[in-house]
Amino acid sequence: MKKIRLLIVIVLFIAALSPFLLGFEIENRYRGILAEFEAAGYQLTSHEYERGFFDSRAESVLSLPINAPNTDIKDISITIESQFLLGPYSLHGWTGDLSRITSIFLYDGKPVFPEDMQAEIITTIGFSGDGNTEIDLPKMSDPAELDKDLFMDFFGLSGDINFNLVKGKITLNLAGDGLRVYSPGSGRLEVGKLELVSESVRGINDLMLGGGDMSVEYFRVMDESSQFSVELNNLGLSASSSVEGGNVNMAASYHFDQLLAADERFGPAELEMEIVSISAEVMARFQESVREMQQQQLPPQQQGLAMMGVMMSALPAFLEQNPGFRINKFELLTPQGQVSATFSLAAEDMKVTDVSAAPLLIQKLVGDASIRAPEPLVKQMLMAISLQQAMNALQNSENAEEVDMAALQSNIEQLTTEQIETVIRQGFVERKGNMLLSKASLKAGLLSVNGKMIPLPEMQ
């Protein structure tokens, strides 16, 4: 009887202590959530966690590095203040969950969203590892000052994130009304309504694999001093990744309805591309290297050297899987007509020693390409390149001011026309109506264009 009483006392004691004991597990799982932000490119610059009996609190600072010229902004740092209600019960009653986390965001020590707007992110974590984050960020009543003379208007974001930290699964479903970043009198960037749906699962070599779709109503950039503007409408992006035989295959597609720039309209446009047979081991090594650099906060120059070292060490394993890149579809409607192209390039049985010798490198590459474009567009692009080269040369000339620009442009136009006619006569380009067509293939060190062999300089 005494043993039973003792057992009951022990069980009740453990039950009474369960919120505090589970607080250690909650802290680990919360740190796992922050690790996902780090994997996405953020830096966890500071993290404090105060554990209580029925509740705890944490303050974490996440910084996103900004490598932009002509600005003193090095990063954008957001402070996340979180309150944890520890389960499975509290002073307020039975919760049934491992924890319920309420988070608010601060920028430069001030709430990003005023308290009266009730902008909270609420995360619930169950004992099974399943979690749900509800996001409801309203429109900001006043612009946020990011830096001197740089402001941001935020128009709201809502949705939810379902995850399981044990299984490594994340599903996102977000919708926002866009934002605007501007500097009065200088320029602005505007992003319209957006939607994001994605699902990813931690798989081979701890890599997150899956897919997602994102759509953006519009994307606008304007420089007020020059009145130059670019507007992209109805942009859509889809991406997916999967594993096959220990290698990762990735696919992405992009499309937009129209692009308005310099009083010209382009679009609709569509691009589909793939990267295949990438060693999962190599990808994991790169991912880990990026995380280490973020934690060490290396300057850009040292980051480049560090990544170069990782690339060289991983190159043998990378080449061993015969990696390849393909553009399966590219279509763009221009003012001059439709442009379409395909491209593929892969390595076959390539070794590290082949990379250092051009003849051996070309022997191990296999690829093909095709392009179909309006002749007026090709001519315009070639003329623009030649004119830019001529202007660069004239900058160092003592007679630059004496140059007749009309005559220069006329000469460039005549030369460009002769170049196009020459490659057509040689058979490297085919003319059909106002369209120019060309196909190329590379195999066993031999390059052919429209069925005609071209000797490669490295092979002579």
Image (cartoon, rainbow, N blue to C red):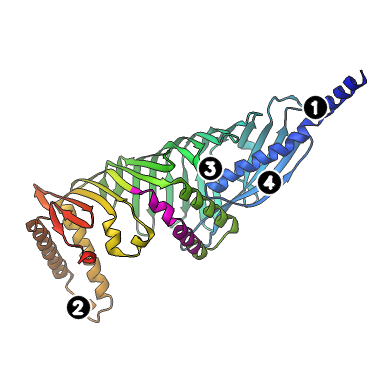
Instruction: Give the residue at x 12% y 62%.
Output: 419
Secondary structure of residue under mark 2? helix
Query: Residue 115: in sight, yes or no?
Result: no
Looking at the image, which residue sits at the far right? Answer: 2
Q: Which of the marked residues, 1 or 4, is nearer the chain's N terminus?
A: 1
Mark 4 neighbour class, 10 Å CA radius: few under 14, some 14 to 19, many 20 or more: some
- Badge number at residue 15: 1
For the residues marked 3 and 2, what is the alpha-carbon distance in whole angstroms? 65 Å
Instruction: Give the residue at x 20% y 57%.
Output: 446
Query: Residue 422: in sight, yes or no?
Result: yes
Residue 270 left/right relative to 288? left
Mark 3 neighbour class, 10 Å CA radius: few under 14, some 14 to 19, many 20 or more: some
Q: Which residue is mark 3?
A: 206
Q: Which of the marked residues, 3 or 1, is nearer the chain's N terminus?
A: 1
Exactly how many numbered labels are in the figure?
A: 4
Mark 2 neighbour class, 10 Å CA radius: few under 14, some 14 to 19, many 20 or more: few
Q: Which of the marked residues, 3 or 4, is nearer the chain's N terminus?
A: 4
Q: Which residue is mark 2?
A: 402
Picture coordinates of residue 439, whole percent (x, y): 17, 50
